[in-house]
Image (tube, rainbow, N blue to C red):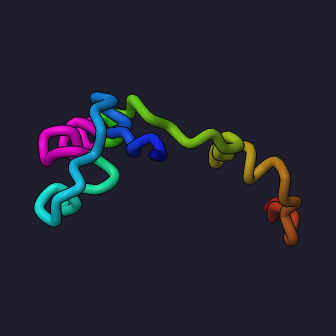
């Protein structure tokens, strides 16, 4: 018999009932809410390259027109 799938939050086996399948891949609404809370508070993060600041963007693009001097 294959191992049952487990909830990524509490590690319990996922319920096999239709009602229990409602929160997949979590075992309950509580575990789904815990996961959502972790995303919203920044506990989870997807790595990516850092964003450029305005100063870096301006330094990287040359001015098309030189400043006008009077």
Q: Is residue 8 left or right of residue 48?
A: left
Q: Quadrant of residue 37?
A: top left
Residue displayed at 31% across by 32% down: 9
- Does 66 appear above or below 38? below
Q: Which range is magenta?
A: 27-37
> x, y (%) of residue 62?
88, 60
**Of helix, strand and loop, which mostly describes the magenta segment?**
helix
Residue displayed at 71% across by 43% down: 49
- Does 64 appear above or below 2? below
Q: Nearer the viewer, residue 67 or 34?
A: 34
In the orientation shown, which residue stands out farthest toward the front? 1
> x, y (%) of residue 50?
67, 40
Q: Is residue 58 magenta?
A: no
Q: Nearer the viewer, residue 50 or 26?
A: 26
Q: Is residue 30 magenta?
A: yes
Q: Is residue 69 left or right of residue 30?
A: right
Where is the C terminus found, in terms of image quarters?
A: bottom right
Q: Quadrant of residue 67?
A: bottom right
Residue displayed at 13% across by 47% down: 29
In the orientation shown, which residue stands out farthest toward the bottom? 64
Residue displayed at 11% across by 61% down: 19
Q: Is residue 37 left or right of residue 58?
A: left
Q: Nearer the viewer, residue 24 or 35?
A: 24
Q: Nearer the viewer, residue 51 or 35?
A: 35
> x, y (%) of residue 23?
22, 56
So how many labels did they put on this image? 0
> x, y (%) of residue 2?
48, 46
């Amino acid at each position: 018999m294959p191992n049952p799938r487990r909830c990524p939050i509490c590690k319990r086996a996922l319920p096999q009932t239709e009602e229990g399948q409602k929160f997949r891949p979590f075992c309950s609404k509580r575990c789904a809410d815990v996961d959502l809370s972790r995303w919203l508070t920044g506990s989870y993060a997807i790595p990516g390259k850092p964003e450029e600041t305005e100063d870096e963007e301006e330094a990287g693009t040359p001015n098309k027109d030189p400043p006008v001097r009077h």
